[in-house]
Amino acid sequence: MIYLTLFLSALISATLFPLGSEALLIYDIKQGYNLYLLLLFATLGNVLGSVINYFLGLKGEEYLVEKNYLKEEKIEKYKSFLINMEVLHFFYLGCQ
């Protein structure tokens, strides 16, 4: 049950809500549970959460355009804005 709780905490932390899965991991380690199983379940939860986020980002754009929640022009505008911010951030870090 401890491992399932850690897995779910890591999954939810990696996808929807910023929970304290790291704190739970440290607590479980201090309680003397198997370190390797704890790391395995925490890693699996985080990786699965990342895959879910990737899939939502990949298919979410199509869904929003298909359901007319967003227009394609708006999405392109947001993408170009984010690319410009990324370039500015790169130059800002390079100048320090």
Image: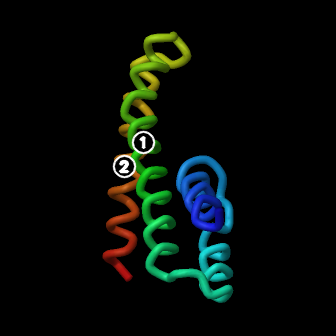
Q: Front-most of 34 and 21?
A: 34
Residue type, numbered disc 1: Phe
Task: Tell me the residue at 45%/42% (across/down).
Answer: 52
Residue 84 badge: 2
Q: Quadrant of the N terminus?
A: bottom right
Measured from the top left, where is residue 32 in percent x and y? Answer: 62, 87
Tell whether 87 sits left or right of 7: left
Disc 1 versus disc 2: distance between alpha carbons? Answer: 5 Å
Question: Mark 1–mark 2 contact, CB under 8 Å?
Answer: yes
The amino acid sitting under disc 2 is Asn
Foreground of the two, 7 or 55: 7
- Count of numbered circles in the view: 2
Q: Residues within 10 Å of mark 1 (few under 14, many from 20)?
A: few
Q: Quadrant of residue 36?
A: bottom left
Q: Is residue 85 above or below residue 89?
A: above
Which element is circle 2 on? helix
The residue that mark 1 highlights is 81
Viewed as shown, does residue 46 lie left or right of 28? left
Q: Residue at x 64, y 60 (%)?
A: 5
